[in-house]
Image (cartoon, rainbow, N blue to C red):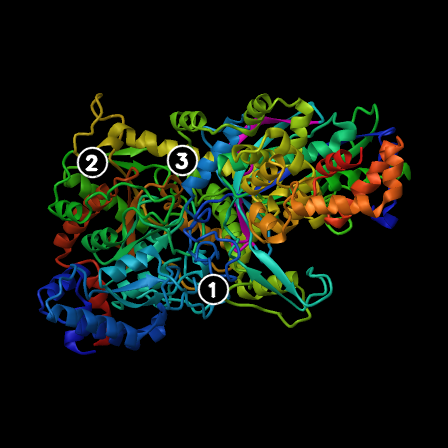
Amino acid sequence: MSAPTTELTGRTADELARLLSAGEVAAADVTRAYLDRIAAEDGDLGAYLHVDPEAAQAQAAEVDSARAAGTGLGPLAGVPVALKDVVVTEGVPTTSGSRILEGWRPPYDATVAARLKAARTVLLGKTNMDEFAMGSSTENSAYRPTRNPWDPARIPGGSSGGSSAAVAGGLAPWAIGTDTGGSIRQPAALTGLVGHKPTYGSVSRYGLIAFSSSLDQAGPMARTVLDAAVLHEAIGGYDPCDSTSIDAPLPVLAESARRGATGDLSGVRIGVVRELGGEGHAEGYEPGVLARVAEAVALLEGLGAEVREVSCPAFDLALAAYYLIAPSEASSNLARFDGVRYGLRVGDDGERDLDEVMALTRERGFGPEVKRRIVLGTYALSSGYYEAYYGQAQKVRTLISHDFAEAFGSSAAGGPAGGGRDADGGTGGVDVLVSPTTPTVAFPLGARVDDPIAMYAADLCTLPASLAGVPAISVPCGLSDGLPVGLQIMAPALADDRCYRVAAALEAAQDDARGARFLDQLAARTGAEAR
Amino acid sequence: MTTTAGDRLVAYDELLTRYEPVIGLETHVELGTASKMFCGCATTFGAEPNTQTCPVCLGLPGSLPVANAAAIEATVRIGLALGCRIASWCRFARKNYFYPDIPKGFQTSQYDEPLCTAGHLDVEVDGETYRVEIERVHLEEDTGKNLHVGGATGRIHGADHSLVDYNRAGIPLVEIVTRPIPGTGAKAPEVARAYVTELRDILLALGVSEVRMEQGNLRSDVNTSLAPIGDLEWGTRTETKNVNSLRSVERAVRFEMRRQAAVLDAGRRVLQETRHFHEDTGTTSAGRSKEEATDYRYFPEPDLVPISPDPEWVEKLAAALPELPAARRARLRQEWGLSPTEMSWIANAGALGLVDETVAAGATPGDARKWWLGELARRANDAGVELAGLAISPRQVAELTRLVAEGTVNDQLARQALDGVLAGEGDPAQVVQARGLAVMGESDELVAAVEAAIAGAPDVVEKVRGGKVQALGALVGAVMKATRGKADAATVRRMLEQRVL
C-alpha cells in the first residue's frame, strides 16, 4: 500500500472534509484511495455487498469539477460514505442481506440516502449485514460473513457488521448503520468505533427496509465522536415522508461534541445502571469489559461529573419484550416479500397456484433466522395469544420507559448543566445513564450461530434504549484481551447532544492519555504485522 | 354439503308466515379525495393500469405511509352526519393476509379503535320509520384489482395468468357498519335498499364521494339471517359481498331470505359463509366459508401516529355540515305539500335531488314528481340504469312539463319528445320542433281534417244527430289518425260538436 493512500484513509471524515473544502486534496484522490483499499482488503474482510468503483469515481469527479467551477458546495462534498444495504438507493442494488431481494434495483432513494446525495458525499458502496437486520454477528447475511478487522477469526458485530468492519478497517471514513435493538452500538463497540442510535423519530425511516417499525433508526458509525455528530446532522431532522418523524429541529450535535472534547463535565450527573452489569447483575459479563467500563466511569468523574448508581428494574425484562415486539412487527413487515412484484420468484411454472409460488419463494428466499422470527411473530400476534405476548410486551415497554423517565427525573427539560436541575437539589434525576454496550468483546465466528439465545444476549445492554426510543451512543473505552470495549451513554429523548458531549469528553481524555486515537492502535497493530 | 344444492326457494309471502329476518350492512365508500390514503398518487377512475402508483402504494421495501388529512376529515364528517361519537384518540391497524392485490401483505385499516362509533340512521319505507343503528365508521385503504386472464369464468380458478392493477390500491375507503337490524319483517329487502339509498344521499350531500355505484365507489356487503318467528336467538347469517347497486341490495336480501327458508325448511342449517351476488339472475352463490375464521393478526400500525382529532375542530365540522337529506326531505315535503308516503316513494326511487332540481328549474312539484316516478322511472328500469343515469337533465324535464302545461304538446307527444331527448337530439323544444311534434291548433289543416272526417262518414253523423252522441268518438279517432296524433283530442271533439250538432 502506498504512503499517500494510507495517509488519506487514515484521516477522520471531519479532516477529509476540511482538506476537500480547502482544495488541498481532490475528491477523486480520496475516493480512489478508498476504492484501492476496498479492492485490496475486502475479499478477506467481507464488509461490502456492492461496490461500483466507476460510479463512485464519477461522483467524486463531479464534485471536483463543481469545485473548480466555483460552485458553492456543502462542507461534506466529496467525502466518501458507505451505506448499510438496508438503505434503499435509487438504481443501486439493495438486498437487505437477503436472497429474496437479490438483483433488485430500487426506483427511489431513502431520505437518508437522498440527504447524503444532496450533500454531495460519494457513495462507496453498500455494506453487508445480517439478513433484514436480524442478528448480532452479520453471520446471518445470505451472501457472506464479515470479519472483524481487529481479529479476522471474530465477528464484527451485527447487524451493521459490514459498516463497522468497513470503517474500522479503513475501507470507509464513516458509514450509515441502522439500529433496532443495538445494531449500530453493538458492532461499533466490538470494532472500536463510535456508533449512535438517535432518538426514535429524529432520523427519517423512509427508505429503510423495515425490520421492526417502532424500533428501527438509522444512525452514524464513525471513527470519532465528532465525525459521528457531523454525519448525524447530515442525515437527521424532520421528514414529511415519515409519519413518525419528529417535527422539531435537531439539537446541536457537532458543537456539543466539540464542547465535550474540552473535557469539562462539571455539573453533569451520570447514572450507572445497576441492572446492566452492576452488582448482582454481572452474570454473563466479561470481567475485562466491566473493568474498562468502571475505568471509563472513573475518568468521567475525574472530569467533574457526579456519578451514582441507578436502578432500572424493568430493564431485566427488555430482552423478553424485545423478542416479542420486534418479531411481531417483522412478521408483518416482511409479508410484502411474496414474489409478486419484485425480487425473487420461485416455482412460477404455470402449474403451481399462487399460494404455492408465494410459499416456495419465501421458503427459498428467507434464511433460517428470518424464518424463525417470522414464525415467532406470527404466533405472538395470533388471536388468543396476542394479549399474552404482544400485549404484555407492550406493557413491559411502558415500564422500561417509566424507568428511564424516573432515572432522568426532571432533568429531561434541560441539557447537561444547562439549568434543568430540579428544585430538590438534583437527587431526582441524572443527565445520562451509562452501561457497557455489550456484555462481552467480539466472539469468534461460528461460536453462537447454533445458540440463538446466546446470540440474542449480545443485545442485552442496548435493548432498553431501543424499546424506550431514547438516544444512546457507544464510544470506545479500552481493550480487553486486545479487543475493543464500548461504553454506552443513554440520554432522554431529543437530548442526543448529551450523548455526544459526554462521549467526546471521554474520547478526548483517553486519547490524551494514550497519545493517539483509539483506532490508531489497530493501524499500529496491522502495520506491525505487515512489517 | 353446500347450501346451494338445487337453489330451492320458498315463496316470499309464504316464508314470512314462518320466519323473521335480521339484516345488517357493511358499506365501503371510496372517498373522492384528490390523492390516495397514504401517498400523493392521483385517484382518477379509469386511468391506464399501474400509472397512478408510487413506492408507497406499491408497497416497495422501505416505503412508509403518511395519512391523508382530507380523508380523515371526510370520515369525521360522515360520522357526524350519522350522529356518531368521534374518537378523541385512535389508531390505524394492520390486517395481515396474503393476496396479490394487497401490495404490503397487509391492509392498513382500523380494528378496535375506529374513528367514529355509535351512530344511527333513520330510514323510511312506505311511511314507516326504521332506525338503523350504526356500530362504527372507520377509515382504511382500498386494494388493487386482480384481472384473471384466460379460463371461462374470469375468476382465478382456471385462469391462465393474472394481472394486478394497483391504481386503486391505497384509495381511501370508509367502511360503515350497521348493528344487526331486526324487526323489519316483510320490509327487510326494502329497508336494506332504503338504508343504502339514504346513506348514498348523505354522502352526496357531504360531497365526500361521487358515490358512483357502477364504478364501485360504493359497495355493500349484505348480511342476512332468518329465524323461526318467536325464536329468541337469531339465525346464522350469510354475507353477500360487494353488492353494487341499490336494486341489487334489495334483490340480494330477498333472494337470501327465500333460499335460507328452503334450507331451514329442509331441516338443514345455514352455513356461515360469504356469498356472491349475480346481477343477471338475481341469485347468490357460495363463496368462502367463514366457519373457520381467518386470523388477520391485527395489531396497531407502527408506521402511523395515532389520530387525535381536536374537539374544537370536530365541533367546527359539525356546525358546518350541510343540510342533510332527512332535513331536506322534511322541508321539501312541506314546500311541495306531499304526504310522508309520497315523499318516501320519491326518496326510495333515488329521485329527490332530481325532483328538487326539476322544481327549481320551473316545474310544479306535482309534474316533476309525475315524470320522474312515472315515465322516466319506467325507462330507467327498462334500460337497467339508475334514474340519474338517464341522458336527461332536470332542466330538460322541467322544459318538457312546461311544453305540456302550455299545450304545445300533449302527454303522448311529450313522450315522443322524451324519446328524442334521450336519443341525444337536443332539448325538448328542439326535439318538438325538429320532429314536428307540436299540437295542432284550429289550423286550416285541422279544419280540413275535421271536415273530411264529417264528409267521409255520413252514417256516423246521422247517428250523432239522432242522439247517439257517443258515436262522435269514431269521428275524433278518424281525425286523430289523419293528423298522426298531433291534434289535441279535446279540441277536435269541440270542433266536431260545433259542426255536427
Which residue carries the number 1 mark? A98
**Mark 2 vs mark 3, CA separation in Å:** 22 Å
Q: Nearer the viewer, mark 1 or mark 3?
A: 1
Residue A166 forms part of the magenta stretch: no
Three-letter residue code for mark 3? Ile
Q: Are marks 1 and 3 in contact (CB under 8 Å)?
A: no
Q: Secondary structure at mark 3?
A: helix
Vertical position of residue A145 compared to residue A217: above or below: below
The residue positioned 70% from the left and 40% from the top of the image is B488
Task: Name the residue type under label 1.
Answer: Ser
| Residue B115 on the magenta segment | yes
Task: Give the magenta-colored segment's residue range.
Answer: B102-125
Pinpoint the chain carrying mark 2: A
Residue with the mark numbered 3: A400
SS of the residue at dot 2?
Answer: loop
Q: Is residue A385 visible?
A: no
